[in-house]
Amino acid sequence: MTKIRAVICGASGYTGSELLRILKHVPEVEITAVTSEQSAGKEVTELFPHLYTYKGVRFVPLDKNALLDKGDIFFLALPHSASQEAVEFFHSRGKKVIDLSADYRLRNLQLYERWYKTNHRFSDTLKHAVYGLPELYREEIKDASLVANPGCYPTTAILALLPALRQGIINTEHIVIDSKSGVSGAGRKSEVAYSFCEIETGFKAYGVAAHRHTPEIEQELSCIAGSAVNVTFTPHLLPVARGMLSTVYAPLKHTIKSGGLGELHSIYGSAYKDEPFVDVLPMGKYPDIRNVRGTNLCQLGIAISENGTLIVISAIDNLVKGASGQAVQNMNIMFGLDETTGLDLLPVVP
Amino acid sequence: MTKIRAVICGASGYTGSELLRILKHVPEVEITAVTSEQSAGKEVTELFPHLYTYKGVRFVPLDKNALLDKGDIFFLALPHSASQEAVEFFHSRGKKVIDLSADYRLRNLQLYERWYKTNHRFSDTLKHAVYGLPELYREEIKDASLVANPGCYPTTAILALLPALRQGIINTEHIVIDSKSGVSGAGRKSEVAYSFCEIETGFKAYGVAAHRHTPEIEQELSCIAGSAVNVTFTPHLLPVARGMLSTVYAPLKHTIKSGGLGELHSIYGSAYKDEPFVDVLPMGKYPDIRNVRGTNLCQLGIAISENGTLIVISAIDNLVKGASGQAVQNMNIMFGLDETTGLDLLPVVP
Amino acid sequence: MTKIRAVICGASGYTGSELLRILKHVPEVEITAVTSEQSAGKEVTELFPHLYTYKGVRFVPLDKNALLDKGDIFFLALPHSASQEAVEFFHSRGKKVIDLSADYRLRNLQLYERWYKTNHRFSDTLKHAVYGLPELYREEIKDASLVANPGCYPTTAILALLPALRQGIINTEHIVIDSKSGVSGAGRKSEVAYSFCEIETGFKAYGVAAHRHTPEIEQELSCIAGSAVNVTFTPHLLPVARGMLSTVYAPLKHTIKSGGLGELHSIYGSAYKDEPFVDVLPMGKYPDIRNVRGTNLCQLGIAISENGTLIVISAIDNLVKGASGQAVQNMNIMFGLDETTGLDLLPVVP
Amino acid sequence: MTKIRAVICGASGYTGSELLRILKHVPEVEITAVTSEQSAGKEVTELFPHLYTYKGVRFVPLDKNALLDKGDIFFLALPHSASQEAVEFFHSRGKKVIDLSADYRLRNLQLYERWYKTNHRFSDTLKHAVYGLPELYREEIKDASLVANPGCYPTTAILALLPALRQGIINTEHIVIDSKSGVSGAGRKSEVAYSFCEIETGFKAYGVAAHRHTPEIEQELSCIAGSAVNVTFTPHLLPVARGMLSTVYAPLKHTIKSGGLGELHSIYGSAYKDEPFVDVLPMGKYPDIRNVRGTNLCQLGIAISENGTLIVISAIDNLVKGASGQAVQNMNIMFGLDETTGLDLLPVVP
């Protein structure tokens, strides 16, 4: 069988290295090029000694013309705004593209420009983008030529609220999303603020009331609800490299109150019963980021507080279901592979 | 000058060892006995090698009659319900008592019995108890014979909401308290669940919609608000030994919206301007548990989300301002010492 | 094809859970029973939520007669001394056995009894045991009915010294093995000493000049050297759950000195060139436990100090190459499978 | 009483921030200036929010002429080689100087130039430098005008071997120093290699057979032994911010063997009985870096292996006894203060 040829652009960051790790377990795929400007010429194993099966593979610069014929699918793990043009280039020349940046996630250009403080120069290409959350857009992804891979925080928040919003059982005025992320969410960075000594034994909020994932969350929640939804979203930085957990709060309408936990579980269970990567935990159980580490799983725990507030706790690995794993899931859907190919590894615990 | 003689009952846990650490820096106090049933006869330094200045000091059993004459102040760091009787014993014999358990915090006996699943046998003694949050009850603590030292979660939550509630600027129906605690909050435990291998690289919620600190938080918030306040409270377990951070959400009344952040800062700044241990951070700054580690400080950061929700982030060291440091602060107040005695050490960072 | 039926005795510890994780990726094997006395009746996922593909599988008690017909291979992950009898039972009834305890590693009974402070009641069975380090005994393992799976520390130490001892280039009088292990080496324990709060930010030596792996290391090194070798071995406890790194020192004979690093690399490279799980790093590179986490790899780095001492740094995952991965490697050899079956997963980094 | 005026040059790193933390507890000292080129103009609390008592204090550039009159004592926490000239400047103008860099530690210029790959331009000033290990040179420090504050690794190694070398009970040919350091030893760095994600759950050796502290260790050990001593020294990087533990091995001469542990303890006990900051642990006890965290203590544990090798385990806080604490200890000696002033704080554990 001819293999699917994959090119990874911007492979020297953690989402890039995770694509390499995961695709190693997808026999249908052959990686034909990995790019990095800063590390061009270096071996992949020099930056990532743990990827020892890639011995001999070297980073090349992102020369779009040279790469064009090498790939059937282009994974773009470039910085925001730098991705805009590369996406357009490969997409307009008939290639399938999965963009892990935020550049094609917001359908409203003004919103993009306000939050990312840069112009969007490819509004025509943007029209082709499908938001790559399979639990919401699986059918569209099957035929998509361009997938905008979701942000990590939005993935946790949307999966936490989707069934409740669809059923119309929550009041959307006072939604609170309290999120906690591992440090790898910040990327592979040489900044004092992300140095070991500045993070160990610490915990703090950041981007309070100002994080760029807010409009992305609101766009998709509004879509599901059928009306504008605004949220209060607070991200925090955990002293762990990986993992993301969001605790999501929304007042329940009077139809369901604390006696109705069983009903809620049944709503969530039904909503996700065919989803390979969403796991609604039994009543009284709540997720731990350890248990999804390295996997594409999203685990959900559900509760109701005494004053009638729905609490959904949603855990993923920010680099897998929150980035590269979801990208491979999207690729599997786009190419008609089994959706779980390469994504069935158990976490390494403890 | 005659020293204040202090007895620490239940000194083999972390709140006990913290009392020893802090009181070492209070020259006015002499520790005359430290008790532990399980470790009676052992040296303090066998359990806590870091307390090397206590070489030669040994734990004794909690023999109340034998201890009675040894102390002017009795710190009780016993388990919940075990503390009830010891408190009554020392208190009824004229001793000053600071109880670090939850036994004398709830003024409503039914509530205590429902949440702690045990009877309260000393309702008369309970009437003498002052809730030991100096920022709320400093005057009462001065003359108190029995101080019920607050829980760690309630300390963060009450200090976060006190100014807003007093000013009447928040809607109390949808208060959300999302809290994250270091593992030492669970005590010095020999359970697999708290073993290093089960905690490292993990993060999870626990006691969801069911934690015993809920009624304590609600009691004090209701008191401040002048009407019943119910909250949604979710504690989480951080993979660090120490530190606690609560992110507290409450919808603002229309009088203050996102433009009003300056007004909020001025309300909080005024409320705490004379408090030695509450630090309202400048606009745009948020606390990190590292920066209060080992200290009695509570640091607060304030924001308003786009949809008009007040966000207050409140950080303490759960073993210090959340337990033993606050107990020493209370002792200082009860004995007319400078309130900061023994509590002016800078954190060790990184 | 008929599957190999595997029984795991003592599956509620970390070596047991690792066997389950790894064997999930061995299609030729079917797990027919997992035992635990304390957790009999519970689901595997109750203790190990991360092993979600084992939903519905329950622990059973170790009823040897009932289990006998269920397995072709018995993995025994029982405590030392408890394993003696179970090994004898299954082995004497014609089953293949891989024992992860220390009970059948020492060929000298007196040594066993002195270090493990218990009698060995099955000296006849002991004669059948092959020490399961494939790099030393691959041929014997092929035909073995009983494999004594090596200890984690011995695995690092022996692989570090094997080529140098075979070549006779080191003086064996002053060998120093300075080892550092993750906490999971102590097992899944409910002891205060292994609680998160007692380990975080700590580092210490333990079992100094008295660790039970000493005679095991000396037995195999003596075998290789052809004369008695005594070592100075100091284990330390790292504040990480997994991973083991030994820094091994031995004075070089005059034939090789600091100019001879290239020669040393070539000796080590040749010795391990066909080994699938020993990786001699290039000159100037040294291993990090992160890069072998969750894998069966042993990575070696080599240097010579100015005063002519060989330094070999040897890193493994203590639960994989140091226990369950090596057990599966041994099983693969015993059953004629490809030796790397189930053991080709890349580590999850960061 | 007139205060001692202290100037800290290069205060934006961790040794600088530790000087600030410790000197806060020395009432006899007033800090008159803190310098930083990169952070000039910024508040100390912007870089180090935990140093909240320094609110309002700002970094100034290192303008030597402007600073000259401000200080009685100059602490130089500048990078190696950058310190050379600043030391000479202040010293030659009659100021007392404590240099925390390596520039004045090696008495042999050729050795300095070989290991630090730069010229030493102030050999005359070098002649005035006293190596600031009080346990070795207390008398010289009393009258010193220039103290070269020891490196962290040398401090652990020298204190571990001093009594044994003085007594002549070890063979100096096969000394092995296996050291493990927290990440803060690398300084406050913006390098990917020291980012949280690259360190967490990792452990590795570095600078193998090539670390710059080797000649410093050898210089002092040779001095004590009265003949040239060469060592094998391997530093490792622990996944903790602070703490250093060295495990030091040396073959015992025949006079003392494993029966002689008592004799060894008595030799070490006598050697350090008057030292305020060296603590020889009881037989069978070994140090943990947690128990000296934030303190100026060096704890030593002693053992003998079966083959007659002395094992000394030596633990310090690399930023305190390994840097800033030792600097303050030296200052106390130079100015006739009680040697423990500012250095009597208990560690914060857990």
Image (cartoon, coloured by chain):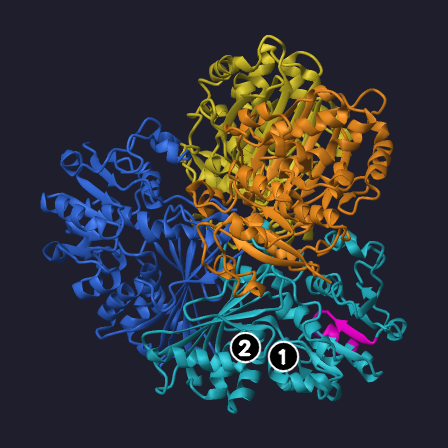
Chain colours: A yellow, B orange, C blue, D cyan
Residue D47 visible, this angle: yes
The location of residue B302, given as percent across then percent down, is 77, 35
Q: Nearer the viewer, residue B23 or D212?
A: B23
Residue under label 2, please give it.
D159
Vertical relation: D81 (above or below) B77: below
Q: Quadrant of the C terminus of chain A?
A: top left
Say left or right for A167 vs C39: right
Residue under label 1, please give it.
D133
Q: Nearer the viewer, residue A154 or C274?
A: A154
The location of residue C183, given as percent across then percent down, is 43, 52
The location of residue B295, given as percent across then percent down, is 68, 51
Badge 1 density bin: few <14, some 14–19, many ≥20, Cα 10 Å: many
Say left or right for B332 vs A144: right
Q: Mark 2 and 1 residues: CB-CB less than 8 Å, in contact? A: yes
Q: Nearer the viewer, residue C205 or C156?
A: C205
* Mark sitting on residue D262: none
The location of residue A107, given as percent across then percent down, is 69, 22
In reply to whether residue D77 is colored magenta, the answer given is: yes
Same chain for the residues under marks 2 and 1 in the image: yes
In reply to whether residue B125 is colored magenta, the answer given is: no
Callout 1 secondary element? loop
The image quadrant of residue C219 is bottom left
- The span picked out in magenta is D72-86
Q: Chain of mark 2?
A: D
Residue type at mark 2 is Leu
Q: Quadrant of the N terminus of chain A?
A: top left
Callout 2 secondary element? helix
Residue type at mark 1 is Leu
Q: Residue at x 62, y 70 (%)?
A: D321
Q: Chain of mark 1?
A: D
The image quadrant of residue D120 is bottom right
Which of the two labelled residues, at mark 2 and mark 1, occupies the earlier sequence position? 1
